[in-house]
Amino acid sequence: MKVFIRVTALAAAMLLLAIVGLVATVLVDDAEATELSDGGGGLRGVPAEFRTWILKASEECQQPELTPALLAAQLYQESKFKTSRAEATSHAGAQGPAQFMPGTWATWGRDDDGNGVSSPWDIGDAVMAQGRMMCSLLKQAQSSGYPGDVRALALAGYNAGWGRVEQYGGVPPQSFAGGETYNYVRIILSLMPRFEGPGRLQVSGSGTGPDALRKAATRIGTPYAYGGGGPQGPGTGFCDGTNGYKNGECLASRTVGFDCSSLVQYAYWPKVKLPRTAAAQYGATSDRPVSRSQLKPGDLLFWAHGGSGYVYHVAMYAGDGNVLHAPRTGKSVEIAPLTSAMPQGDYLGATRP
């Protein structure tokens, strides 16, 4: 989101040359230096801390045009996923990764990450506000009757304000504001393929198990956070002296995500209110065992050290010999073969909630 200034013809020409260079080199720029999170949900190549919120914003809008890739491309164009005040404050005063002006933030901003503050600098708050605003603009675009791609119209409204779209009866032309809005729209739509990842897991059938698996599949790519997450979705985890660390650093305490059992709890809630830990989930369902030859989508699979006395991991059967699970710190929710998801010798058995 920007506030426009006049530019000379020479400056406009230089801007266009710069844009050409951006489009030509966008696949090898500095965004790749950030730790990226990939895997399903129609999204790839975004910083891990953004992924959950992008998927959530897309899902909550329920407008098919607001894809995760569109939101990711827009965030990249706005801030390159930067979050520091030095790097994500525009000359006009737009703030945060989604570049909200204070007046616009007052309309769309909320405390989505639950930390007690509504801030354009918080990734969750910013991305969800971006999603709400884009969702509203898409609905305006669809009912406007203006020609062209409704995504382009919504992006133009985000950048210049919907009043400018109404003024021009569509995306403002290159002659408006030195071509900023025109090129903003063009660049974002051209960037989308960069962020388009594998689709969601296709789950057939109906019932408690398939429904839970479908719900869990929407979280493919969400970071693993030991102790994080629960029935309402992903959350920040913690370290306990043994778990939650990567390279000696407590990664869980600054990661919004799921661990293996919170993902399962989230997937089945509220239809089946499973307990929080893998061991407790095994205890609650062990009276309904399932052999490997009878596995169905959504069945729970457990791994243990030294028998059922220490169950340390749970996954959901995803069909075709695969499981869906949150594996460990440093990884993300993923699909993996049952035979290699965890050590085969630790496999305890499966149950049906």
Image (spheres, rainbow, N blue to C red):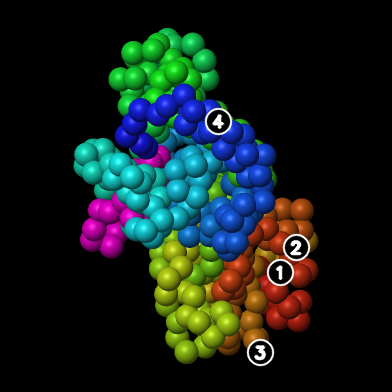
- Distance between the alpha carbons at the discs numbered 4 and 3: 65 Å
Residue at the spot x=47%, y=89% of the render? Answer: 241
Q: Nearer the viewer, mark 1 or mark 3?
A: 1
Residue marked by disc 4: 16
Foreground disc of the pair 3, 2: 2
Residue 75 at x, y = what percent?
Answer: 47, 45
Q: Which amino acid does label 3 sit on?
A: Gly
Mark 3 → mark 2, Cα distance in angstroms: 22 Å
Mark 3 / mark 2, whichever is N-terminal: 3
Q: Position of residue 234 (x, y in %)?
A: 44, 60
Callout 2: few (<14), some (14-19), or many (20+) C-alpha neighbours within 10 Å? some
Q: Does the segment drawn in magenta span residue 117?
A: yes
Q: What residue type is labelled 1?
A: Ala
**What residue sits right under mark 1 in the picture?**
341
Return the disc, 1 or 4, that comes first in the chain's sequence: 4
Q: Residue 306 carries which label?
A: 3
Residue at the location (59% across, 56% down)?
30
Q: For the residues marked 1 and 2, what is the alpha-carbon distance in whole angstroms? A: 6 Å
Location of mark 2 (residue)? 337
Percent position (x, y) of residue 22? 60, 41
Say whether residue 162 is left or right of residue 326.
Answer: left
Q: Separation of disc 1 and disc 4 at Cα?
A: 49 Å
Q: Pointers 4 and 3 in contact (CB under 8 A)? A: no
Q: Indicate the amino acid at tag 2.
A: Pro
Q: Which residue is drawn at 46% across and 68% down?
A: 255
